[in-house]
Image: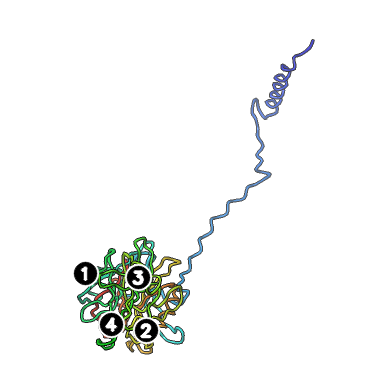
Amino acid sequence: MKINRLLAIPAACLALSFAFTSCGEGEGDIQWWDWSQNNPQPEPEPEPEPEPVADPYVELGCIDVKDTYEGLSSASLPEYMGVYTYQQEFEGKEIKAFIAVADMDKAKFSVLGEAEGYNTPSEFYAAEPHAIIINGGFFWDGASLSLICRDGEIVCPNVQVDSPDWTDTWYYMPRGTFAQREDGSFFTGWVWTTVPGQTIWYPTSMPLENGRVPDMTYPEGAQEFAAQTAIGGGPVLVLDSKVINSYEDEYLLINPTDNRPRTAIGIDAANNKIIYFVCEGDGMTSGIPGMTLEDVANFMIFLGCNEALNLDGGGSSCMLINGNQTIKPSDSKERSVVSAVALD
C-alpha cells in the first residue's frame, strides 16, 4: 500500500515530539541547558567619571575669586559669569587687574547713563543693581563725549569735532565704539554722526586731516550704524586678534604710553564671551604702576579677545562686583562719571 508523502511529515513530527517529552527527569518536564554556564557574560563597565573642564583663565594665571572675593558667595553671581584677578608680572610689568567674563548666550550687556548727568558707579548700582559694572566712555563738564546707544536708539553720539586751537584747525574724527547687534553678536569699529543725525560705522579709522569730514564714501567701507546696544570710547585696541594703534586718528589726548589705571571691554567671539577689564595704577598699590594702551591691547588678546575697545581710564577706572569695589581708585574714591556698562 502506498503512503501519501504529505501524511508522512506529520507522523515524523509526532515521533520527534514524543522523543523530546520522554527524555526529561519526570513526566512531561522539558529541561533547557543554561548555555551561559559555558559562556559567562562580563559585568558591565561602570560609566567613567567626566573629566573636569579646565578653566582657561586659571590656566593663563588668573585667580578665580568668584566665590571668595568680599561680598561674594557661590550664589551671588550666575553660573555663566566669572570673576578673576591677575596679580603678577605680564610682559615685564607687575599688574593688578580684575577681569569679569560672561557667556553671552545667557548674559545681558547693557549701557547706563544719559547724554548729561554725573553718577559714581556706586550710584549707578544703587539705581539698578547690576552684577558687574565698569565705568564707560569719556565726558567733559557733565556731558558725554562718547556714544551711548540703548534699545536701538542713539542716546548720545560720539563727539563730532575737536580742535587743538578752536580757531583754524578742525578735526572731524570717527571714534571707537563697541556694539551689540539685535541678533546678539558684537562688533567693534569707528563711528561718527553727521549733523543731520545719521550715524555711520567704519571698519577703519580715518587719518586726521584739517577740515575733512567723514561721510558714506570716506573712509572706505562705511555702513549705516545698526546696533541695539553700544558704548563709545577709544581708541580701538584690538581687531582680528591684532593690536590696533588708532589713538592719533581718533584724536584722543589720553597719554597712551603712560602707565595708568585702564578700563577696557572686549569680545571672545569664538566662545561668545564678553570680557570687562580694569587695572590699578598711579601708585595706589606699591609696585603697581598701571598699564599703557599697548599693554592693555596685548592683555586683551592674551585673554582671548579678537576685538577690544579702550574706555575712560585714570581716576575713572572702576569695577563693581555686586556693588563691591575691586581696584583702588586713583582719586582715592570713586569718580563721578557720565556713562557705565553693566553685565547681568
Task: Work out whether residue 199 or residue 94 is closer to the camera in this orientation and state it.
Answer: 199
Alpha carbons under labels 2 and 1: distance apart: 36 Å
Badge 3 amino acid = Met
Q: Quadrant of residue 275?
A: bottom left
* Quarter of image, res 28: top right
The mark that comes first in sequence, 2 or 4, is: 4
- In terms of secondary structure, where does tag 2 sit? loop
Q: Nearer the viewer, mark 2 or mark 1?
A: 2
The x, y position of residue 337, in whole percent, is 24, 78
Mark 4 element type: loop
Residue 3, position in %: x, y?
A: 76, 13
Q: Residue at x 25, y 83 (%)?
A: 333
Q: Which residue is the site of mark 3?
A: 216
Q: Which residue is mark 1?
A: 127
Sequence order check, earlier mark of 2 and 1: 1
Q: Badge 4: few (under 14), some or many (20 or more) residues near its Cα, within 10 Å?
A: some
